[in-house]
Amino acid sequence: MDEVEVVVAHSERATLRVGDVFLKVDADQARIDVEVEAMALAPVPTPEVLWRRPPVLAIAALPGTTLGRLGGPSTGAPAEWAAAGAAIRTLHDAPLPPWRGRAGRSITALAAELDDECETLVTNGILPADLVARNRRVSEAALRPWTPAFTHGDLQIAHLFVDGGEVTGIIDWSEAGQGDALYDLATFTLGHGEHLDDVIAGYGTAVDLDVIHAWWSLRSLLAVRWLIEHGFDPFAPGCEVDVLRSLM
């Protein structure tokens, strides 16, 4: 090992790779507490925790590769996407953790946050009014009662690893907790909707596609300004703004 790779870095947290070790630096110790406990409870492969010295958590690298990334090409055979769906279902069927996660925010609070964010996006000229209005209507389907499941809460495509057709691990559990199972499925397929059928086949039960589409809209609307403010580009091809446009 002769270099340190910055995996992600912004004002809230950073992740570095040093050889086969990932170092997560987070000023919010509550997030690290959730991550460690969630990995211990989750009935799916997770990284080995090597050591913890606040504010740093060291975990081992996982074997295999991801199925792609948001804004980039997707990889993997349909069977690998189905394997991801089966692993997600295993997580959702597990006994509930005793806390709510990001996927478990209250409908009332989420609707209020969404309305405020939509107003800001339009008022500040970040996104066109018609794009925001259309996706706000689409997102309404997500604002409904749901049965709590053990959710990851930030199940981006880059957080799940596969090797030889099997899931070898899921990383980044700081948003885990009780929540809406369809939030995880929508997050995993965000920007890669062409693989949704394969994921659902592995998941093993029918899902409400209108709710999946709603979570695509809702998550993207809430993310755009945050991403800009933290040095990311939601306007890049295939990213959040393209997702919003695809739902027009």
Image: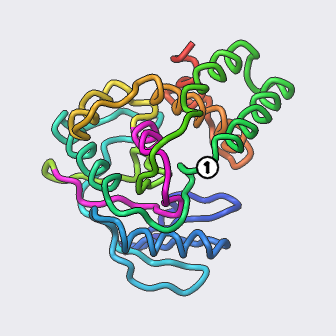
Q: Magenta stretch containing residue 86, yes or no?
A: no
User: Which residue is more in the foreground, 71 or 166?
Assistant: 166
Above-or-below relation of 199 to 55: above
Res 43 quadrant in image: bottom left
Residue 107 position in % (x across, y down): 64, 41
User: Which residue is more in the foreground, 34 or 172?
Assistant: 34
The residue range painted magenta reads 166-188
Secondary element at image label 1: loop
Q: Residue at x 70, y 36 (%)?
A: 111
Q: Is 61 displayed left or right of 53 in the figure? A: left
Q: Is 49 displayed left or right of 166 in the figure? A: right
Q: Which residue is mark 1?
A: 105
Q: Residue at x 15, y 48 (%)?
A: 165
User: Which residue is more in the foreground, 38 or 54?
Assistant: 38
Quadrant location of the C terminus in the rendered image? top right
Name the image colouring: rainbow
Three-letter amino acid code at the position of disc 1:
Arg
